[in-house]
Image (cartoon, grey):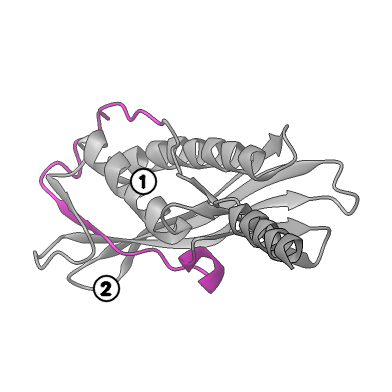
Amino acid sequence: MKYFLIGVAIVLFIGCTNTVPPKVEYRLNSNFETQNLSSLGCKEKTLKVAQAFSSNTLMSRDMSYGLGSSKQYVYSESLWSLTPNRAITANFLEELRDSKLFKSVQISKSRSRNDYILEINIVDFMQYFDEKSTSSEAKFTVSLTFIDAKTNKVFATQTFTSKVLVTTLNANGGVEGLNKALADVLSQSNTWFEKVCK
């Protein structure tokens, strides 16, 4: 009986020390440094950046990936620290503030009146694998629309896409690829913002 109780205690102790590995949290960090832009057409205008439109998947911290042409899964041990929807919106907001193109750039919840509203529609933001999981790419597609806040008329609109080959076939590689794709789209949009403000 004594040995039986010792055996049960050992099994229980081993069972209690078996821990589930914590999920790794990843941040979107494009490392994109905006240069002051030279266009003067918006210097006296104000802009409000609306919260991005996106699928429900991008409003979750779950990190999804595509497999082949039709399958989609979620990484079991990886999470976004902030939902892609919010992180992408924040990146555009920061880029526009740093560009100095506008008199001021406000968040969506600001009560201030503005000359323009920027709508962001995230079409795609995900890592994709081929059917055999032998290659992978990160893809980011976003549509931007400038709206005249007084008339609600579209002032300008443009869609941007970036695809980045992923070298490490896992969540970490996907995050690296998506950060590069985000930086590429921010660079493309920067050029467009400058043209819009001429």
Q: Is residue 164 left or right of residue 61?
A: right
Q: CA distance from mark 1 to mark 2?
A: 24 Å
Residue 178 picture quarter:
top right
Residue at the image position 82 percent from the left and 41 percent from the top = 135
Front-lying residue, 61 or 165: 61
Tag 1: residue type? Asn
Q: Is residue 15 visible?
A: yes
Quadrant in the picture for the C terminus: top left
Mark 2: which secondary structure? loop
Residue 149 picture quarter:
bottom left
Q: Is residue 197 visible?
A: no
Query: Pointer 1: what residue?
Result: 91
Mark 1: which secondary structure? helix
Front-lying residue, 182 or 102: 182
Q: What's the magenta bit mostly, secondary-structure-wise?
A: loop
Q: Which mark is residue 152?
A: 2
Front-lying residue, 1 or 40: 1
Q: Range of the magenta residues?
A: 32-60
Q: Which mark is residue 157?
A: none
Percent x, y of residue 85? 43, 60
